[in-house]
Image (cartoon, helix red, strand yellow):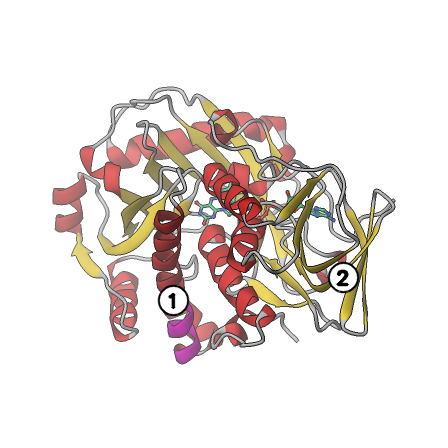
Amino acid sequence: MDAVTRKTDLRDASPLWASTPLISVITSKSCALASYDVIIVGGGISGALTAEALADGKRSILVIDRRKPVTGSTMASTAMIQHEIDTPLGDLSRMIGEEAAARAWRRSAASVKALGKRVRALGISCGYQPKQTLYLAGEGGGPRKLSAEFRARQAAGLEVTYLNGASVEEAYSIHRKAGLLSDTSASCNPAQLAAGLLREARQRNVEIVEGVEVTDVAEIGDRVALSTSSGTLLEAGHVIFCTGYEFLKSVANKSHSIASTWAIATPPSTELPEWLTDTLVWEAADPYLYFRKTRDGRLLAGGEDENDPEAYHSEAKMKSKPKRIIKKLSDLMGIKLPEPEFVWSAGFGVTPTGLPYIDRVPGMNRAFAVMGFGGNGITFSQIASEIIRAEVEGKPDPDSDLFKFPS
Ligand SMILES: Cc1cc2nc3c(=O)[nH]c(=O)nc-3n(C[C@H](O)[C@H](O)[C@H](O)COP(=O)(O)OP(=O)(O)OC[C@H]3O[C@@H](n4cnc5c(N)ncnc54)[C@H](O)[C@@H]3O)c2cc1C
């Protein structure tokens, strides 16, 4: 039976988080009811954040996944929870206008703060740690571009510090001509975060079903009907497709594509500069290198992206790309790094603006799709959970216009 969403191996090899504790959730193999207030398709970080946001103990909510929850793209994430959107504010302003771009960046910063509060309030054990972000000048932008970006961010009311080459050298022993330093970001174990949210939602009566695929969707009056691979027909007042890069086939022609990326993690207690403990790093380049330190002292890094949805399956690239990432890291920080203990590759969704789509499924009123997240997936999933909750509660979010499908 065909699925209503794209179907693919979301990632190759085993990412770091797959061997960590606290990443499982108690699930059922079949649905208890035929009718729910809300059905969330997908049990990754987007579905988990949305489920927890909606779980008020009164609504009947089902999270349904064709896999074990948390084992899709969320397991592959390097989980740099950045308020900085992949598209610099200056570039985004040229694409969607200054006011809208500033609003998108401010919303992103506010949502990272909100996520931190949420994790603390719920007491989710996922190594959540507030961090600074260092954005380095690179092939995609030197001091002139970074100082323009600095001014744009300041004008938008965002906290940021400009560092010239000498300051970058002094603070980080990195030879780059400029950098932007900002607070507000964070990092965590994304699998533990998603599993913790799902466990929390489950305690508030959210039902979680694994191994059942949604095969079709139709809106009938004020209800949304779903057919499933188990043969059960379901219906709900709202359906939210949080299916990540396995997006709905009906939106495949919307501005959105899948690219390939690679990631590595060195062994615990790798010898690393002290400042990396509380700093995420990325650079003005395309593709860009990004890295951070985990709580157990690994260097976790990614990059080498290719605009090819199949490249991440290549065995040859699985050997060559991690080597290039390690070499770039060693050259940048001037340190010798050990062989990585984990290397993995995955597909990820990209949109022309770098902003996600959080919108009604075209032609439907009560079915929503949450998709198209690039490197800011977790931040955007938090925004999605805020917008979807507002929509379900009938009080539309003031920023929802930023995340609409192109018409
Ligand atoms: C290598 C890599 C590094 C990344 N690094 C970062 C980072 O540093 N910071 C950051 O913020 N983001 C990062 N991201 C992005 C972020 O991880 C993703 O945006 C996020 O994990 C997507 O979560 P999701 O819940 O939308 O998708 P998923 O975790 O893939 O969950 C979707 C679920 O939907 C289910 N599903 C799909 N179709 C159906 C169907 N028809 N019926 C039933 N179930 C279905 C799937 O089985 C899956 O479990 C990275 C991504 C990758 C791949």
Percent coordinates x, y for residue 312 in the rendering: 60, 36
**Is 147 situated left or right of 123 in this image?**
left
Residue at x 25%, y 29% (from the top left corner): 272
> Where is residue 248 shown, x and y percent of the image?
72, 56
Residue drawn where x is 35% and y is 20% of the image:
338
User: Left or right: where does residue 30 sit relative to residue 135?
Assistant: right
| Image vertical order of residue 170 relative to residue 225, above or below | above
In the image, 373 versus 212, the foreground residue is 212
Look at the numbered disc 1 and give the secondary structure of its residue: helix
Per the image, label 2 sits on a secondary structure element best described as helix
Proximity of marks 2 and 1: CB atoms separated by less than 8 Å: no
174 relative to 259 in the view: left or right = left
Q: Amino acid at mark 1?
A: Trp
Residue placed under numbered mark 1 in the picture: 105
Dominant secondary-structure state across the stretch colored magenta: helix
Can you see residue 284?
no
Q: Which residue is mark 2?
A: 250
In the displayed structure, 378 sits above or below 354; it is above
Image coordinates of residue 359 in percent, x first then y, are 61, 68
* Mark with earlier residue (2, 1): 1
Residue at image point 30% right, 66% down: 149
In the rendered image, residue 185, in percent from the top left (x then y), is placed at: 32, 52
**Quarter of the rendering containing residue 358:** bottom right
Please tell me how crowded label 1 is: few (under 14), some (14-19), or many (20+) other residues with Cα within 10 Å: many
Is 178 positioned to the left or the right of 370 in the image?
left
- Taking the spot 29% from the left edge, 56% from the top edge, the residue there is 184
Q: Amino acid at mark 2?
A: Ser
Quadrant where the image shows the C terminus: bottom right
Magenta range: 99-104
Quarter of the image for the N terminus: give it: top right
Q: CA distance from mark 2 to mark 1?
A: 29 Å
